[in-house]
Amino acid sequence: MTNIATPGAASEKKGKNIFVTVGTTRFDKLVSAATSKVALEWMERQGFSSLTVQYGRGEKRRLPSSPALEIQTYDFRPSLTEDMERADLIISHAGAGTVMEALRMKKKLVVVINTDLMDNHQTELAGAMAARGHLFMVTEPRQLDEKQTWASFEDDNFVPVPHREGDPFEMSKLLDSFLGFPVPSKLD
């Protein structure tokens, strides 16, 4: 098992990129599932050349090696923007900030629900955005151990609906509705 953690290595190699992020929290189950043998084999078959994993407050661990993928890991950086912009696919926790940023960038986004959280508002946000076709929602990390879940992310199977531009308050209205605040107009 090898872990390539050379800063900037993923950005130098040409090809498709995957970015896995847990934000500022700990979500080891997502990191493990997104770097499993099933996951890495799917990434190789789909022509990805780099995988960048931001593991937040989680445990730094050795990841399986892959002959076709450069793998880079880190806990925190001042900004995730560069990694998100470079990514062809983002696999993320369902934090509102990450979801909003990925939608703004028009990125293909897979959101994995952290089932260990109590009072999980992330499920509601991810569910609403998935229902609108903006992202693909995985309801628990162990689903990433299944080949058919990964097949759902393939280009022919998952083409996200771009987030509507023009109403800069659409996401705030959506969040307000989940938090129980009055929403002045219809969301759709």
Image: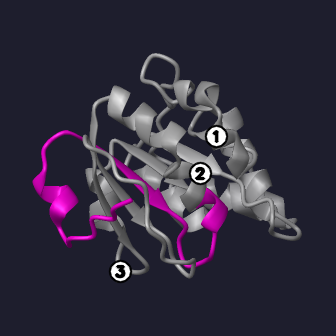
| Circles 2 and 1 in contact, beta carbons < 8 Å | yes
Q: Is 160 positioned to the left or the right of 170 in the image? A: left
- The C terminus appears in which quarter of the rendering? top right
Q: Position of residue 87 (x, y in %)?
A: 32, 49
Task: Check if residue 38 falls in the magenta segment.
Answer: no
Q: Residues within 10 Å of mark 1 (few under 14, many from 20)?
A: some
Q: Position of residue 20 (x, y in %)?
A: 46, 57
Give the alpha-carbon distance from disc 3 to disc 2, as whole Å: 22 Å
- In the picture shown, does residue 35 fall above or below 162? below
| Circles 1 and 3 in contact, beta carbons < 8 Å | no
Q: Which quarter of the figure has residue 97?
A: bottom right
Choose the circle earlier in sequence order: 1 or 3: 3
Q: Which residue is tagged 3?
A: 77
Q: Secondary structure at mark 2?
A: helix
Choose the circle earlier in sequence order: 2 or 1: 2
Q: Position of residue 95 (x, y in %)?
A: 62, 64
- The N terminus appears in which quarter of the rendering? bottom left
Q: Which residue is tagged 1?
A: 145
Choose mark 1 or mark 3, whichever is in front: 1
* Residue range of the region highlighted in magenta in the rendering: 1-30
Q: Residues within 10 Å of mark 2 (few under 14, many from 20)?
A: some
- In the picture shown, does residue 138 fall above or below 26? above
Name the amino acid type tagged 2: Ala
Name the amino acid type tagged 3: Arg
| Residue found at the very far front of the displayed protein | 1
